Image (tube, rainbow, N blue to C red):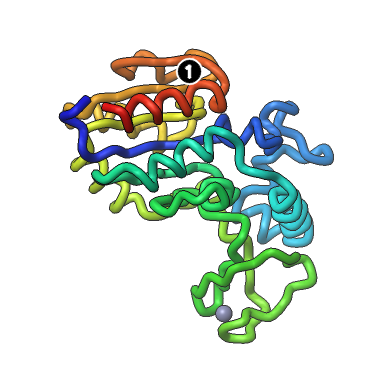
C-alpha cells in the first residue's frame, strides 16, 4: 500500500452505534409515535417548531452523555499519524470523532452541537436547549435552528468532498448502509475516478458490490486493525 497517499474516509451511523447512539431506524424509525422523517424536515419545523426543537434538544443532550469508542480512537490515530492527505467525511451529527482527537473531519450533515441562525447565517457552538427560542449570540434575533441537514436539504461542503475524492488514492466507507445519497454515490464516483475502494461494515451493505474489498464486523473490531495495517504499510 505504499502507493497510497491521499485517503477519504466516509463514516456513518455504524461507527457511533457502539457508543450507544441509535438512529431510530433500528426502532422502526419512530420517536414518540412520530416518524423521524416527520421531525427532520424544513416542513416539519415550519409546521411544528416546538416538536422539532424538543426532538433535537433531546438528541443534543443525549450525545453529550456518550463517549468515543475504539473505532473513533483508531481514526483519530490515523489522523495524527498519517502524513498524507486525509479527509474524514462523516454523516454523523455527533462530535465523537473530534472528542477522540480527530481534526480533519467534515460534517456533511451538520452537527448537533451548533445552532444556526437563519437571520444572520452565523453558526454558534451550542450545548444547551433551543426550545425556549434563545437569542442568537451574534445578532440577537430569535431565529436559531439545529445546524443539522434535514431531509430535502443540501448536505454541506460537497465541493470540498468531491475535490478530495478526485485527489484520493483510497476511499474507505465505514459503518454506512450505502442507502442514503449523496454519500452512497461516493463509491461510484471513486470507481469512475479509478480510486481504490474498501468497505468496513457490520454486514454486506446495499452498496457492497461497488467496493474492491469489503470487511465485515462491528466498527470497533474492524477499524483498529485496518488503521494498524495502513499505518504500517
Ligand atoms: Zn443571528
SS of the residue under disc 1: loop
Q: Residue at x 20, y 41 (%)?
A: 166
User: Vertically, is 50 above or below 35?
Assistant: below
Q: Quadrant of ligand 1?
A: bottom right
Relative placement, left or right, of 54 versus 110 is right
Residue 131 locus on image (x, y percent): 77, 66
Q: Is residue 39 above or below residue 205?
A: below
Asked if residue 93 can be seen in this view, the reply is: no
Q: Residues within 10 Å of mark 1 (few under 14, many from 20)?
A: some
Q: Which residue is mark 1?
A: 205
Check the picture and name the quadrant holding the C terminus. top left
Query: Is 134 placed above or below 205 here?
Result: below
Q: Nearer the viewer, residue 106 or 193?
A: 106
32 on left or right of 27: right
- Expressed as whole percent of the image width and height from the top left, the position of residue 151 reads 55, 45
Q: Please identify the residue farthest to the bottom as the structure is shown.
A: 140
Quarter of the image where one finds residue 132: bottom right
Residue at x-position 46% and y-position 29%: 174
* Residue 123 point in image, percent of width and height: 53, 70
Amino acid at each position: 500500500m505504499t502507493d497510497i497517499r491521499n485517503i477519504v474516509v466516509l463514516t456513518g451511523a455504524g461507527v457511533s452505534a457502539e457508543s450507544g447512539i441509535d438512529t431510530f431506524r433500528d426502532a422502526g424509525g419512530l420517536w414518540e409515535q412520530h416518524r423521524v422523517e416527520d421531525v427532520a424536515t424544513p416542513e416539519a419545523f415550519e409546521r411544528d417548531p416546538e416538536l422539532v426543537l424538543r426532538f433535537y434538544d433531546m438528541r443534543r443532550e443525549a450525545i453529550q452523555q456518550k463517549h468515543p469508542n475504539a473505532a473513533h480512537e483508531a481514526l483519530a490515530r490515523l489522523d495524527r499519524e498519517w502524513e498524507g492527505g486525509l479527509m474524514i467525511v462523516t454523516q454523523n451529527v455527533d462530535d465523537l470523532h473530534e472528542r477522540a482527537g480527530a481534526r480533519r473531519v467534515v460534517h456533511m450533515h451538520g452537527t448537533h452541537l451548533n445552532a444556526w441562525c437563519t437571520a444572520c447565517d452565523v453558526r454558534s457552538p451550542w450545548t444547551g436547549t433551543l426550545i425556549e427560542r434563545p437569542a442568537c449570540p451574534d445578532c440577537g434575533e430569535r431565529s436559531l435552528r439545529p445546524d443539522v441537514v434535514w431531509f430535502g436539504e443540501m448536505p454541506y461542503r460537497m465541493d470540498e468532498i468531491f475535490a478530495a475524492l478526485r485527489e484520493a488514492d483510497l476511499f474507505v466507507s465505514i459503518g454506512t448502509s450505502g442507502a442514503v445519497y449523496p454519500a452512497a454515490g461516493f463509491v461510484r464516483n471513486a470507481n469512475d475516478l479509478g480510486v481504490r475502494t474498501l468497505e468496513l461494515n457490520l454486514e454486506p451493505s446495499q452498496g457492497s458490490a461497488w467496493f474492491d474489498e469489503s470487511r465485515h464486523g462491528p466498527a470497533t473490531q474492524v477499524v483498529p486493525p485496518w488503521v494498524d495495517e495502513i499505518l504500517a504499510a
